[in-house]
Image (tube, rainbow, N blue to C red):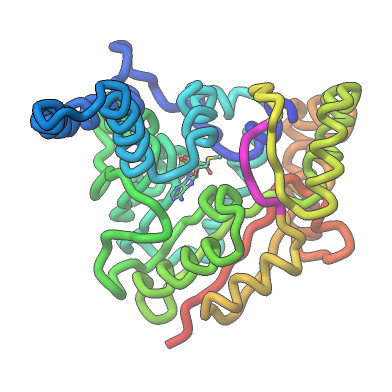
Amino acid sequence: MPESCADLKCPNSHLAIASKKPRCGQDLVIARINELRKVSLHGACSFDRMGGSLLVRGAEREGHKQDMEERFRFIPKEIETHYLQGRESQRLSGDRGELERLRTQAILGRSLPAAPAVVFDVGGAAGVYAFPLAKQGYLVHLIDPVELHLEQARSYAASSGIALGSIVRGDARHLDVPSRSADVVLLLGPLYHLVEHSDRLAVLREVHRILTPRGVLFAAAISRFASLIDGLASGFFRDAEFRKIVAEDIASGQHRNPTNHPAYFTTAYFHRPEDLAAEVHAGGFGDVQIVAIEGPVWSAALFHEAWDDPVQRKSLMEFLSLIEREPSVQAASAHLMAVARRPN
Ligand SMILES: C[S@@+](CC[C@H](N)C(=O)[O-])C[C@H]1O[C@@H](n2cnc3c(N)ncnc32)[C@H](O)[C@@H]1O
């Protein structure tokens, strides 16, 4: 998948990247592991005195290091590696990224409570949605598992003077947030990176816990057919390995990228619109609406031309709002959004 599936979410190009090379998540993990290794090495010395073999000790240490790495990484290594490439910061430079961002903001704008209200942006990356909301007067807390994204968000907060309520590392499945403290939760990423139904349900229940009664959830998903549509539009479909990935996406929704081609995205689950609605209902939500974010136009041959013309762009945005709930075309959108409320 082109810049697309990667392009699919994370349009962060407006965010300034720190001029100083940020300390990435991997560095922080390794630093923490090294601290812990000092303790384990000390333990290994006494084992040595007891006659333990150096080989066994080395293997144990290696195993311990891997254990620690796993413990300090909230998400699978390949997903973290994908985001540590830092490609997220350019996601909005293309027209499709802008379409996705403007449509997402239009969808949010219709159902957000008036500012000031408390918003948790879970999986918020570098804050492409968080900062504009904070600027509008919302108290926005940003949570993401990738340290690089948090560094980018902190850097942007410092350079723009727009303050967020907090910027913290975390996993959507276990939020360190009091119950009933959020008026709004944005979940624009975590649902598609959790490939097990049980994990996605755990996230939805956790979000339900932190929302106030009648609080609003916005949860994004990637369409089951996004890689097929995108593959044709971008030329990746020429690659037999890519076509195998598409076959599995369509068959099971389980997207994997054994090629490690950076544009083919990373481990994810691709939803059908009806599956997304059922999951959000199962998480305890009522009034669940599924809307298509980009609609069926994002991969059209002349999309760029229409997007660059202000008159056509305005008309396109209006048509996309008009058809966003049309079930017969929803799955042709790259992304879907579930908009739902926590019942009283
Ligand atoms: C494609 S990016 C989307 C970022 C941003 N919300 C947007 O819409 O542009 C997906 C984000 O989900 C985050 N993520 C992945 N798994 C997560 C999890 N278990 N909990 C919280 N965030 C997660 C990633 O770190 C990444 O920032």
At which x and y percent is residue 107? 60, 57
Q: Name the residue at the bottom extreme.
A: 344
Identify the residue at horizontal 34%, vertical 49% (top origin).
170
Q: Is residue 302 visible?
A: no
Quadrant of the rendered image containing residue 69: top left
> Is 26 in front, or is 160?
26
Asked if residue 229 is positioned above or below residue 49 in the image, the reply reads below
* Magenta-span inclusion, residue 329: no
Which quarter of the image is occupied by the C terminus?
Answer: bottom left
How many marks are shown on the rendered structure?
A: 0
On screen, residue 294 versus residue 36, left or right, reads right
Q: Is residue 13 visible?
A: yes
Identify the residue at horizontal 85%, vertical 35% (top origin).
244
Asked if residue 203 is positioned above or below residue 226 in the image, the reply reads below
Asked if residue 208 is positioned above or below residue 249 in the image, the reply reads below
Q: Name the residue at the front extreme.
A: 51
At which x and y percent is residue 190? 51, 51
At which x and y percent is residue 41? 15, 27
Identify the residue at horizontal 24%, vertical 41% (top origin).
163
> Is 103 in front, or is 207?
207
**In the rendered structure, which segment of residues is drawn in magenta?**
265-270
On screen, residue 110 versus residue 236, left or right, reads left
Identify the residue at horizontal 34%, vertical 47% (top origin).
142
